[in-house]
Image: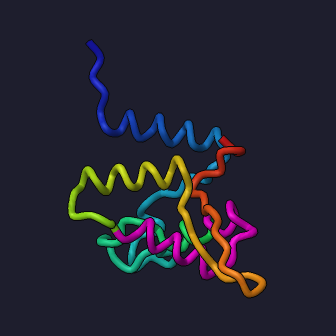
Amino acid sequence: MSHFTESVIEETTLAWLKDLGYTIVFGGDIAPDEPAAERENYDEVLLSGRLKDVLKRINPNIPPEALEDAYRKVTRPSSVSLVGNNRAFHKMLADGIEVEYRADGRIKGDKVWLIDFGFV
């Protein structure tokens, strides 16, 4: 029987992501207090700058205020239940995030996507 270690799974996943065109960065290089830091401390689970950048790239026709609303929905759990939050996040991944914004004097509704399904 084969035994997988965390490092085997990590290296396999990183290779797969690299093959898809992602840039792989060593975590220590973007750690707090490093010149290329992408978070203030290790309590920050998400790399907020990267998430905001990808939201803009994937959703170019959505205004900034609606993208900020989607960012808040992703980063602020809506439930005290871990299972409920996992389900809500899965729904956002699969179905997009409903947002509203003002355009041409009217309130418009749209979806913000977390994944570019045309890319994968």
- The answer to whether 8 appears left or right of 64 in the picture is left
Counting from the top left corner in percent of width and height, residue 100 is at 59, 74
Q: For the C terminus, give its image quadrant.
A: top right
Q: Give coordinates of residue 94: x percent, y percent.
A: 52, 47
Query: What main secondary structure does the magenta stretch of the protein show?
Result: helix
Check the image and name the residue furthest to the left: 80
Q: Would you say residue 50 is visible in this rendering?
A: no
Does residue 85 sit above or below 33 in this rendering? above
Q: Which residues are magenta?
A: 55-76
Tell me where residue 37 appears, x and y as whole percent. 47, 75
Quadrant holding the N terminus: top left
- Residue 46 placement: quadrant: bottom left
Q: Is residue 111 left or right of residue 91?
A: right
> Of all residues shown, which one is farthest toward the top?
1
- At horizontal 31% and vertical 27% (from top left) the residue drawn is 4
Q: How many marks?
A: 0
Query: Between 80 and 38, which is closer to the camera in this rendering?
Result: 80
* Residue depicted at x 56% and y 55%: 96
Which residue appears at 54% of the width and 66% of the height?
51
Which color scheme did the rendering employ for the protein?
rainbow
Which of these two is toward me, 119 or 69? 69
99 is higher (above) or lower (below) than 33 = above
Report if residue 32 lies within the magenta region: no
Given residues 112 and 45, the one toward you in this image is 112
Furthest-right residue in this view: 104
